């Protein structure tokens, strides 16, 4: 095995994480290679040095700053309205529908052929309006013809036996 | 309660990662502010410590990428890490302190991801499984990052010692 390959295996070797074959190969190489066995000692020293870094105490000043965070946050919250409700999952369909509406509106407003769209909308409105007018006129003529035949209809109704009741 | 339990651990990770005491204090404050803002998103089925460490790790790495902390040097090792440890052989003590100083400065040469893996494994002494959870990485990737970090630091130590011997 070459020295470069051994280097890669030294860290797992120190943690006893190599397979028995790899471990055997590393040990065999270390017996014959002074450079690699010296490098192993540097690896050990590195690991020891890292493990020996002491834990520092937190300064009083930092502790004061950390304890005051929730109060600061509360003050901040009071000054600004919260928009957290917008993130509720139940609002998602509403927000999705609003997005679609906005897309359609923006499609209309930013369309280069806006005046064609306006024309076709106007035409549709006029068509609808004239249909309604025609319907209204028909309804009027129907009521007129009903008025003309009103008397005849009343006489006919009076002549129907069932509606006369018990006159006899 | 959160401050009492976690401030020391978070501050030490921030200091080991950033290498500047002042910076570490500010970063710790930012991490706790982020923690209070994110508590509502915490999933109670998950391990809280791992979740908090993930939040701290993400913040530290993001800040590092954004600013590179402008300066390349770390605080002098002796400023805060000079230990009162006594050695039977004073010469051995000097050599050990010198190695620690070289390693401390060498941490600056590691990429942010490798640096974090080394800090969690070799300084904080966490298990590989815990680190994989904190860093959201497969176990194999974590092991390989720790290996690469140790290799880089050992090379730095070797070069430093060889230079000193030449002098």
Image (cartoon, coloured by chain):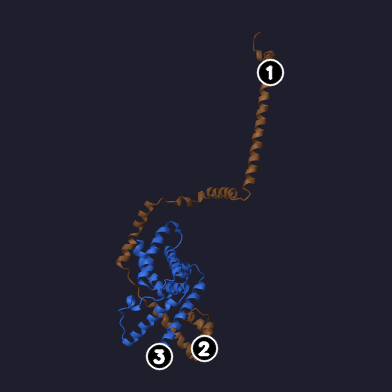
Q: Position of residue B59 (x, y in %)?
A: 44, 66
Does A3 sit above or below residue B44?
Answer: below
Reading the image, the residue beneath label 2 is A29
Does A78 sit above or below residue A131?
Answer: below
Residue B87, numbered circle: none
Work out which quarter of the rendered image holds the C terminus of chain A and state it: top right
Work out which quarter of the rendered image holds the N terminus of chain A and state it: bottom right
The blue-coloured chain is labelled B
Q: Are marks 1 and 3 in contact (CB under 8 Å)?
A: no
Residues packed near mark 1 inside 10 Å, few (<14), some (14 to 19) or many (20 plus): few
What is the quadrant of residue A156 in the picture?
top right
Residues packed near mark 2 inside 10 Å, few (<14), some (14 to 19) or many (20 plus): some
Q: CA distance from mark 1 to mark 3?
A: 128 Å
What is the quadrant of residue A133 in the picture?
top right
Q: Are marks 1 and 2 in contact (CB under 8 Å)?
A: no
Q: Evaluate whether residue B89 shows in this view.
A: no
The brown-coloured chain is labelled A
Q: Disc 3: which chain?
A: B
């Amino acid at each position: 095995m070459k020295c470069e390959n051994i280097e890669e295996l030294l860290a797992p070797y120190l943690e006893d994480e190599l397979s028995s074959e790899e471990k055997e190969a590393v040990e065999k190489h270390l017996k014959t290679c002074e450079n690699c066995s010296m490098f192993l000692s540097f690896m050990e020293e590195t690991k020891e040095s890292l493990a020996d870094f002491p834990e520092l105490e937190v300064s009083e000043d930092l502790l004061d700053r950390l304890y005051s965070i929730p109060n600061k946050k509360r003050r901040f919250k009071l000054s600004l309205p919260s928009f957290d409700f917008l993130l509720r999952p139940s609002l998602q369909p509403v927000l999705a529908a609003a997005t679609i509406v906005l897309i359609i509106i923006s499609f209309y407003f930013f369309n280069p052929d806006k005046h064609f769209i306006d024309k076709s909308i106007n035409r549709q409105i006029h068509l609808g309006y004239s249909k309604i007018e025609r319907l209204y006129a028909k309804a009027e003529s129907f009521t007129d013809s009903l008025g003309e035949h009103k008397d005849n209809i009343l006489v006919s109704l009076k002549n129907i036996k069932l509606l006369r009741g018990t006159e006899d | 309660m959160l401050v009492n339990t976690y401030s020391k651990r978070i501050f030490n990770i921030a200091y080991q990662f950033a290498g500047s005491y002042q910076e570490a204090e500010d970063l710790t404050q930012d991490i706790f502010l982020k923690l209070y803002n994110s508590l509502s998103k915490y999933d109670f089925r998950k391990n809280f410590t791992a979740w908090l460490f993930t939040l701290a790790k993400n913040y530290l790495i993001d800040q590092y990428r954004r600013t590179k902390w402008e300066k390349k040097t770390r605080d002098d090792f002796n400023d805060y890490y000079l230990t009162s440890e006594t050695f039977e052989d004073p010469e051995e003590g000097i050599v050990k302190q010198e190695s620690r100083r070289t390693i401390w400065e060498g941490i600056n040469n590691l990429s942010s991801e490798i640096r974090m893996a080394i800090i969690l494994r070799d300084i904080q002494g966490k298990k590989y499984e815990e680190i994989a959870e904190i860093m959201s990485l497969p176990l194999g990737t974590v092991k390989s990052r720790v290996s690469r970090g140790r290799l880089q630091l050992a090379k730095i130590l070797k070069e430093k010692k060889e230079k000193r011997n030449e002098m």
